[in-house]
Amino acid sequence: MNFLELAKNRFSSRSYKPQPVERETIKNVLEAARIAPSAANKQPWHFLVFTRQESLKKAYQLYHREWFKQSPVVILACAEKQNAWTRAEDNKNHADIDLAIAIDHITLQATELGLATCWICNFFVEKTKQMLNLPQNLEPIALLTLAYPADSPNVERHKTLRKKLEEIVSWENFD
Ligand SMILES: Cc1cc2nc3c(=O)[nH]c(=O)nc-3n(C[C@H](O)[C@H](O)[C@H](O)COP(=O)(O)O)c2cc1C
């Protein structure tokens, strides 16, 4: 697959096969996050990986959808806010941007390996912090499912659900 094909094939899968994901495959996907760019190369991220039944039982309580509980792997992407680059002019902390890039690398690498993912930001944030006893410096940003999909991408759907290029791009004349 060339890159655009890969990007079009990535989709939010919400139905998974029970088949476990090999540890080496999970590591391969996480490697894509590791090499992601970040502001000032701060790499302000940490990934919690849930694969065993006891830990998955906890992870499944962090989001309310039933399909989520089918995923044999759950990754919680956290930001180390204090370690992220902050722009001096307006004090903007770039952790969220850095995390988004790393997570997107994960979703694309997973797609390349025939795996499916779904970003989840609508999870129970406070419960997550408490249940996992997260240290103060770790902010949970997103849950990610990682599994062999039981559904398939509808590449045509991307074309209809996405805005047209003309709607999102301005060329040259901005006034
Ligand atoms: C930052 C972010 C947060 C998201 N949070 C959720 C979520 O909490 N629950 C969910 O089912 N999907 C979530 N999604 C998936 C989006 O709904 C999905 O990416 C979007 O509808 C486009 O569909 P596609 O991923 O299949 O291309 C999230 C996606 C992103 C990028």
Image (tube, grey):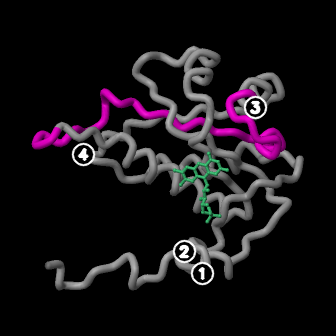
**Label 4 near ligand 1 (CB < 8 Å):** no
- The answer to whether residue 59 is left or right of residue 16 is left
Q: Say what secondary structure mark 3 lies in.
A: helix
Residue 111 against residue 173 in the figure, above or below: above
| Other-residue count near label 2 (Cα within 10 Å), few / some / many at <14 / 14–19 / ≥20 | few
The residue under label 1 is 159
**Three-letter amino acid code at the position of disc 1:** Lys
Q: Quadrant of ligand 1?
A: bottom right
Tell me what residue is drawn at x 57 percent, y 71 percent: 7
- The residue that label 4 is drawn on is 40
What residue is at 74 percent from the left and 27 percent from the top?
A: 61
Query: Quick one: quadrant of the N terminus?
Result: bottom right
- The amino acid type, in three-letter code, at marker 2 is Arg
Asked whether residue 1 is in view, the answer is: no
Q: Amino acid at mark 4?
A: Ala
> Does 58 sit above or below residue 64?
above
